[in-house]
Amino acid sequence: MSVTTAAEPYYDPYDYDIDANAHAVWKRLRDEAPLYRNEQYDFYAVSRYDDVLRAILDTDTFSSAHMTVLEMMTPEPLGSLGGLMIFMDPPQHTHLRKLVSRAFTPRAIHDLEQRIHRLCAEFLDPFVGSDGFDYIDDFAARLPPTVILALMGFPEGHADEWRKAQDAMFHMEEGEQGFVRSGGGYGNPEERLAEVESSGGNLLQMVPELAAERRREPKDDLISVLANSDLEQDDGSTRKLRDDEIVGFSMLLSSAGTETVARHLSWAALLLARHPDQRQILVDDPGAIPNALEETMRYEAPSPVNARWVNRDVAFQGQTVPAGSKLLMLNGSGNRDERHFPDPDVYDVRRRIDRHLSFGYGAHFCVGAALARLESRIAMEETLARFPTWDVDESELGWVHTSTVRGFANVPIHLR
């Protein structure tokens, strides 16, 4: 039985116009089709806060092991392919997450703080006294790769290369469904991951050699953690990570640490231009910036769509999603659900937020959330200290279009 008909709301994650006006579409889904079925792309979607949270937390029913990007999903689980923990379920995911978490300690994050302040000054100071600049291309897209590559342990000088590789990897032309081949079909998982990995170019090719160096002489970086830590197995034994697994981790963490922070800051720049009264609150009280950034993530999630494979029949809104289905969790929609957030379409930097869905929850809560929060807080502190007012001509905005990431590649700001 189809959940929707042609007369009902339509959601297509690949449609540019829908992407640009997503909140209007998502509201119709929440109100009229909280369990939505898209026959063309063969997925279900949940859009209300409680339904999205339920799916995020239930890893037994809603699996990540078939990939979490709609156009890359596979009928069979990937197993340990590529060592990518984002495409695993507990307990395998738990073992890998525990290992990686050793590098994201509060001390390690704190030690980055002064470096991030220095980088912000380096990137922003040249524009003091100017008429304006592209907040993303000149600053917000440069900061995250510089920070995450340093935390990983890559040599300096590769941030721009990695940023361009990420832009090429994530961007999708209108009408293109991600990794669809020109002759139809998606190829096998190995081909798809190899295509993604190849976008990293010379940087990821360095990883095996860097891992070998860190085994001989560990440093205070993530590659050293990956190369030298013991990975717990299901039977209680331990082993070291293989080089291909370290490459997979490096790709995953470097990508996640680059793309979503840049999109988050793109929304912050635009929303504060749209709401100068809210921006003035932050200029007058920089201590309000952390909460303002949480509100920004609630209001505009940089990664608003995540996919899961349904392991068994499950009911949503009185209807059944059958086992073997693809389910999209629209966390960007859940963050605007009036059933959970009062006045959800109001951007309020002093809003009391119990929990938004932008970082996920439970087993797959973003492992780099603390770093993302640190980077974005310092970026906004340093921005507002130099540029308390700016305008944005929204005709000049340049979108990033993918099925999972939503935000801007370009936000030219005009200084007063």
Image: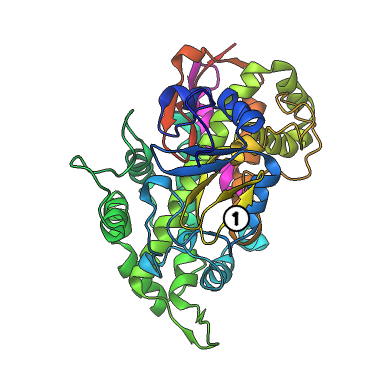
Tell me: 364 left or right of 183. Answer: right
Can the viewer see residue 147? Answer: no
Q: Residue at x 60, y 41 (%)?
A: 331
Front residue of 227/264: it is: 264
Position of residue 345 measured from the top left corner of the image (x, y, whole percent): 70, 24
Q: Residue at x 73, y 28 (%)?
A: 344
Say few, some or many: other residues with alpha carbon within 10 Å of mark 1 (under 14 / 14 to 19 / 20 or more): some
Q: Disc 1 marks which amino acid? A: Val
Position of residue 361 measured from the top left corner of the image (x, y, whole percent): 65, 54
Which scheme is used to colour this image of the protein?
A: rainbow
Q: Residue at x 34, y 72 (%)?
A: 243
Q: Which residue is the site of mark 1? A: 314
Where 298 falls versus 83 (above or below)?
Answer: above
Which secondary structure is most common in the magenta stretch?
helix
Tell me: 301 left or right of 352. Answer: left
Can residue 365 be found in the magenta stretch?
Answer: no
Can residue 119 be found in the magenta stretch?
Answer: yes
Q: How many marks?
A: 1
Can the viewer see residue 357? Answer: yes
The residue furthest front is: 1
Q: Residue at x 28, y 61 (%)?
A: 190
Magenta residue span: 112-135
Position of residue 403 measured from the top left corner of the image (x, y, whole percent): 43, 38
Where 413 falls versus 175 (above or below)?
Answer: above
Where 309 falls versus 99 (above or below)?
Answer: above
In what element is the residue under mark 1?
A: strand
Quarter of the image for residue 121 reads top right
Quarter of the image for residue 35 reads top right
